[in-house]
Image (cartoon, helix red, strand yellow):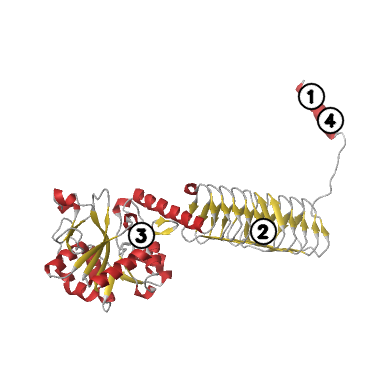
């Protein structure tokens, strides 16, 4: 269920699209659900900002049901009646509770089947259950059957002492659900149809309602406020770090690192403090990612060294390459095996060949650079003429002298040299020397004469 607005967030964005662990909250729930059933059997009920939510997770292949008017959780399942007809069992998940696990969903489903229940709710024991609906068990303590779920506002002082709460996750017998769901009432403070009231509806109809407790209360917690979101984010990221540590990755001071849920890292790679690894980043084995680096949606081969303060987005880096410190690899950067991109070098939409080096203070954009090329400090590929982008081609074995300006479109032939401080506007043939600067002129005694003139003027 993902139709709510989330007014307590004080946000213009849909609640389920706020990010935790590097992707929308709803995307986490869907990803977990997809490990239980195929995507075509998953239905996301959307309402507030429906099209934005649909667009954000459309790539998952799930189905959507629009709850145009949000009149409560019970009403959400009412509008899904047609979509869910034909299913013997319906599992309801909360779109704002991203920590739910595959194991718990299967446990809920299996228990529901074993109990031959009409409704099964997932419960949890909380030290502070304030604000949650309390689970009222039927008969002797410890029995699985449930008589009702009582909301905080309606609970008696005795019921408020109950620590077992309703999580908002359910399993229903599909036909029975839609046989009885129209018995829900809006006679409550908010005038809404509450799905929790189905426990009482089924109890009065002498249908079996049971509850099963999760072993980890934290996994059913929702994210109603930004503070709660950050608690879940910390929990998720630390869990990600623990999983990587178990896979052979070294992470120094994990609580200082930001590592998104979908990041993959090979064994014996070392992650230093204050590193951010975002999106679908994949890092090979035996790499070292040094502090203050930010890597997003990039792929790094094995034995790569990323020195401090390096930033990259949508980049590819070959095995044994060395990056940084303070390099900036923008989208489309493809750094070859054993290549070097050094301090204060910015790249964009380039291919840097095997063993090539750009070690200092350069901008390389829209360029194809061959193998064994040396890019001198301060080199610039002038790729933009104010209207269009143009390409620079530098073939294998080229030496580009410091402070060179290469005005695209231009091609520097194999094995050639470009003299320092040259402005190159025409193609350079292989094995040539290109100079694009004025001849040096020296005026002896000029500085002495200038100083003497200044002294004379100051008298």
> Which residue position holds label 1?
455
- Mark 4 neighbour density, 10 Å: few (under 14) some (14–19) many (20 or more): few
Q: Earlier in the sequence, mark 1 or mark 2?
A: 2
Alpha carbon separation for disc pair 1 and 2: 60 Å
Q: Which of marks 2 and 4 is nearer the N terminus?
A: 2
Q: What element carries label 4?
A: helix
Task: Nearest to the eye among marks 3 and 1: give it.
Answer: 3
* Camera-nearest residue between 242 and 87: 242
> Which residue position holds label 2?
320
Name which residue lies at 14% across and 50% down: 158
Q: Is mark 3 on a helix, strand or loop?
A: helix
Viewport quadrant of the C terminus: top right
- Where residue 16 is drawn, which disc sits there? 3
x, y percent for residue 222 = 32, 56
Q: Which of marks 2 and 3 is nearer the N terminus?
A: 3
Q: Is mark 2 on a helix, strand or loop?
A: loop
Q: Is mark 1 on a helix, strand or loop?
A: helix
x, y percent for residue 447 = 82, 33
Q: Quadrant of residue 49?
A: bottom left
Question: Residue pushed farthest top?
Answer: 459
Q: Quadrant of residue 194?
A: bottom left
Q: Left of 418 or right of it: where is 288?
A: left
Q: Quick check: marks 3 and 4 in contact, CB under 8 Å?
A: no
Alpha carbon separation for disc pair 2 and 3: 40 Å
> Which residue position holds label 4?
448
């Amino acid at each position: 269920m993902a139709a709510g607005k989330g007014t307590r967030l004080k946000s213009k964005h849909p609640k389920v699209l706020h990010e935790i662990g590097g992707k929308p909250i709803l995307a986490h729930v869907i990803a977990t659900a997809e490990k239980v059933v195929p995507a075509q059997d998953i239905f996301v009920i959307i309402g507030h900002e429906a099209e934005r939510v649909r667009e954000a997770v459309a790539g998952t292949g799930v189905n959507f049901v629009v709850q145009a008017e949000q009149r409560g959780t019970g009403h959400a399942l009412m509008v899904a009646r047609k979509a869910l007809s034909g299913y013997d069992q319906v599992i309801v998940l909360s779109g704002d509770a991203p920590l739910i696990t595959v194991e718990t969903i299967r446990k809920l489903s299996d228990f529901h089947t074993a109990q031959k229940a009409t409704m099964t709710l997932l419960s949890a024991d909380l030290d502070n259950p304030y604000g949650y609906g309390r689970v009222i068990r039927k008969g002797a303590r410890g029995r699985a059957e449930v008589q009702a779920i009582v909301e905080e506002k309606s609970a008696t002082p005795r019921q408020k002492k109950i620590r077992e709460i309703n999580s908002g996750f359910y399993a229903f017998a599909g036909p029975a659900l839609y046989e009885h769901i129209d018995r829900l009432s809006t006679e409550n403070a908010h005038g809404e149809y509450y799905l929790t009231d189905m426990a009482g509806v089924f109890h009065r109809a002498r249908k079996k309602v049971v509850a099963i407790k999760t072993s980890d209360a934290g996994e059913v917690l929702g994210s109603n406020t930004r503070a709660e979101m950050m608690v879940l984010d910390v929990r998720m990221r630390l869990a990600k770090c623990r999983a990587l540590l178990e896979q052979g990755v070294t992470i120094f001071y994990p609580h200082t690192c930001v590592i998104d849920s979908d990041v993959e890292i090979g064994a014996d790679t070392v992650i230093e403090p204050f590193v951010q690894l975002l999106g679908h980043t994949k890092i090979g084995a035996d790499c070292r990612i040094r502090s203050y680096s930010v890597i997003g949606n990039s792929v790094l081969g094995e034995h790569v060294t990323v020195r401090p303060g390096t930033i990259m987005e949508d980049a590819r880096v070959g095995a044994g390459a060395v990056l940084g410190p303070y390099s900036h690899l923008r989208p489309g950067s493809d750094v070859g095996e054993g290549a070097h991109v050094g301090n204060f070098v910015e790249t964009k939409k380039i291919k840097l060949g095997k063993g090539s080096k750009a070690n200092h203070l350069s901008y390389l954009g829209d360029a194809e650079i061959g193998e064994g090329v040396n890019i001198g400090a301060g080199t610039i590929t002038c790729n933009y003429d104010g209207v269009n982008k143009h390409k620079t081609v530098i073939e294998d074995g080229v030496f580009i002298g410091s402070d060179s300006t290469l005005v695209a479109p231009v091609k520097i032939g194999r094995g050639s040299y470009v003299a320092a401080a040259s402005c190159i506007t025409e193609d350079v043939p292989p094995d040539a020397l290109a100079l694009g600067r004025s001849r040096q002129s020296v005026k002896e005694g000029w500085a002495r004469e200038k100083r003497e003139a200044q002294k004379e003027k100051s008298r």
